[in-house]
């Protein structure tokens, strides 16, 4: 009996040796390393790789490629639009600066015109004021001359009367012609 081996012993010894035995429920070990199953595993590996290749090449990669192409197109369009907007912004800035220079020139011209107009009005007002002052000054000088002449006449009359009264008070005879001649000579210098 010792030389007779049963199927269970064979399965047990095969399991210990790492062989894959299987159909009657005995231990198999690692099926991926089972040499008996290797052609089956290679077949399914090839089938799986072919299916993955076709799925990727026919469905996934074209979709990814179209998304990348669309994205690249969008990026290119956005860059072109940004460049165009940048050019427009530079042109708008240049136009703004030109308008600013023109506005400053116009403002300076308006200020110069306003200054000239104000200067004209000021000169006219000064000329009118000078004319008014000259007229009033001439009128005042005439009045002063009149007053001075009137004052001299009054002084002459008062001087004649005073001289006449002094001569009479001192006991002399006052001749009107002599008093007038003496007062006139003294007033002249």
Image: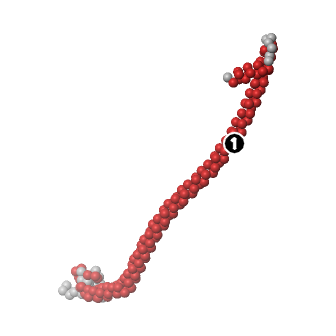
Q: Position of residue 86 (x, y in %)?
A: 44, 68
| Colour scheme in use | secondary structure
Q: Residue furthest top?
A: 171
Question: In the figure, is residue 168 to the left or right of 86?
Answer: right
Which quadrant of the structure image shows residue 67? bottom left
State the residue at coordinates (79%, 12%).
172
Viewer-closest of 120 and 183: 183
- Tell me, yes or no, if residue 82 can be seen here: no
Q: Which part of the image, by quadrant, shows the N terminus?
A: bottom left
Which quadrant of the structure image shows residue 69? bottom left
State the residue at coordinates (54%, 59%).
106
Viewer-closest of 107 and 75: 107
Q: Position of residue 95 (x, y in %)?
A: 49, 66
State the residue at coordinates (70%, 21%).
186
Q: Secondary structure at mark 1?
A: helix
The residue singled out by tag 1 in the image is 135
Q: Position of residue 163 (x, y in %)?
A: 77, 18
Viewer-closest of 151 and 183: 183
- Tell me, yes or no, if residue 6 can be seen here: yes
Which quadrant of the structure image shows residue 38? bottom left
State the residue at coordinates (22%, 86%).
5
Mark 1, Cα crowd under 10 Å, few <14 / some 14-19 / many 20+, is few
In the rendered image, the vertical position of residue 8 relative to residue 180, given as above or below? below
In the rendered image, the vertical position of residue 40 relative to residue 148, given as above or below? below
Question: In the figure, is residue 116 to the left or right of 79?
Answer: right
């Amino acid at each position: 009996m010792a030389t007779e081996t049963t199927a269970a012993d064979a399965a047990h010894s095969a399991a210990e040796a790492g062989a894959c035995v299987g159909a009657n429920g005995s231990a198999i070990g690692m099926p991926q390393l089972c040499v008996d199953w290797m052609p089956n595993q290679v077949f399914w590996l090839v089938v799986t790789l072919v299916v993955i290749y076709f799925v990727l090449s026919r469905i996934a990669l074209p979709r990814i490629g179209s998304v990348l192409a669309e994205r690249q197109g969008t990026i290119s369009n956005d860059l072109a639009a940004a460049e165009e907007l940048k050019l427009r912004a530079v042109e708008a800035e240049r136009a703004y600066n030109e308008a600013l220079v023109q506005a400053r020139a116009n403002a300076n011209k308006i200020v110069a015109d306003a200054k000239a107009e104000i200067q004209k009005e000021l000169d006219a007002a000064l000329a009118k004021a000078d004319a008014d002052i000259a007229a009033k000054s001439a009128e005042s000088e005439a009045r002063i001359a009149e007053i001075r002449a009137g004052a001299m006449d009054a002084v002459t009359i008062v001087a004649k009367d005073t001289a006449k009264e002094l001569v009479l008070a001192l006991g002399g005879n006052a001749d009107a012609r002599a008093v007038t001649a003496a007062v006139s000579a003294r007033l002249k210098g």
